[in-house]
Image (cartoon, grey):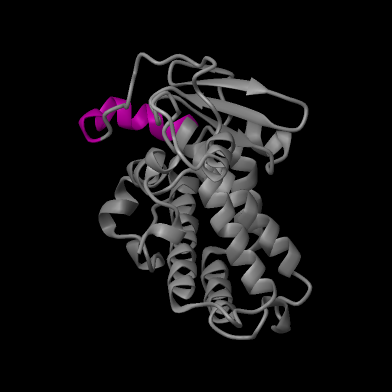
Amino acid sequence: MKSVKQAHFRYLTKKEAKNPLYTIAYFCRNVTGLAHWRRDIDRVIRVSATNGVGLKPIEFANLHFCWQQICQHIELIYVLKHAVRHWEIEPESPHYTLTRYPRTAIIFDRTLFRGTYLEFDRLSRKEFDNIGLFIDKFFTFKSLRAWQRLMDKLLITLLSENRLGDYSKYERQDSKIYRYLEKLTEVFFLIYATKAIAHIAAHHAADFLPDDPDNKPDGNAVSEGQQEQALLTSEVPDDGAQPSMERDGGPTAENRN
């Protein structure tokens, strides 16, 4: 197994790099949910591809938070690239339930938010079945150092009128770069579901007490997107309503400050 030196990282602490699955589980359970994170990163991409003119200071702060998290996620999957040998997804697991559809796959985590469906529709079927294929392509496209330099430029685009495509080095790569970042959002939560849950259950159960371990995937559990839509359309929640998705991992980037 190839060793990974701490000097490679800008945003990972030594503790986080030593226990990357714990760090991933913390983010996915305590920081934000997949639907919210996908929306946050889509916004980062839109601003980078256009400009940040007219944004309020709080919006810049939220964009910077998301940018910093992406940088950390890139470093985390770099650690895992050298730490995990087998990435093939298990169709059956005691830690999740997998359901496939023609263009999407859904994983049900009964310990998250009293039962939560995580929907994956950006990864290809091969990438979903073997996360290692995506990780290999990600770091073949650009090395860790190259991704770090690219993210420095992307930060400038969030704070100025520049676009990533304005830099000659990236002008013909920007759309491909954005697709990689879009897929990275799903890869992170897929690693959580297929690797991190089992890890924390075995080694850190006390730190991640399940909301309701006896819940089963039934009609009472809904997807993040459905719960978010319910928030937008319901002015007065009733006593029997499902709790909002904010609780599955904390506030979205827009409400952290």
Q: Position of residue 195 (x, y in %)?
A: 44, 32
Name the residue at the front extreme: 236
Name of the residue lying farthest toward the left? 206
- On the image, the x and y values in percent for residue 197 come to 39, 30
**Quadrant location, the C terminus:** bottom left
**Quick one: 104 or 256, which is closer to the camera?**
256
Q: Is residue 242 magenta?
A: no
**In terms of depth relative to the viewer, which is nearer, 242 or 223?**
242
Give the residues drawn in magenta, as a range.
194-207
Relative to 214, say whether 197 is above or below: below
| Magenta residues, dominant SS class | helix
The residue depicted at 45 percent of the width and 14 percent of the height is 216
In the picture, measured across the screen, residue 159 lies left or right of residue 124, that is: left
Q: Examine the image and state in which quarter residue 151 appears.
A: bottom right
The answer to whether residue 165 is left or right of residue 48 is: right
Report the number of discs.
Answer: 0
**How far across and down, in percent of the image, does residue 40 sit?**
54, 57
On screen, residue 121 above or below 45: above
Residue 209 lies, in percent from the top left, at 26, 29
Residue at (76% x, 32% y) in the render: 103
When the figure is inspected, residue 148 is found, relative to residue 250, above or below; the finding is below
Q: Which of 57 and 181 is in front in this view?
A: 57
Is residue 202 shown in magenta?
yes
Side of 217 relative to 17 (left or right): right
The image quarter containing residue 22 is top left
Q: In this view, does 179 lie above or below 242?
A: below
Quadrant containing the N terminus is top left
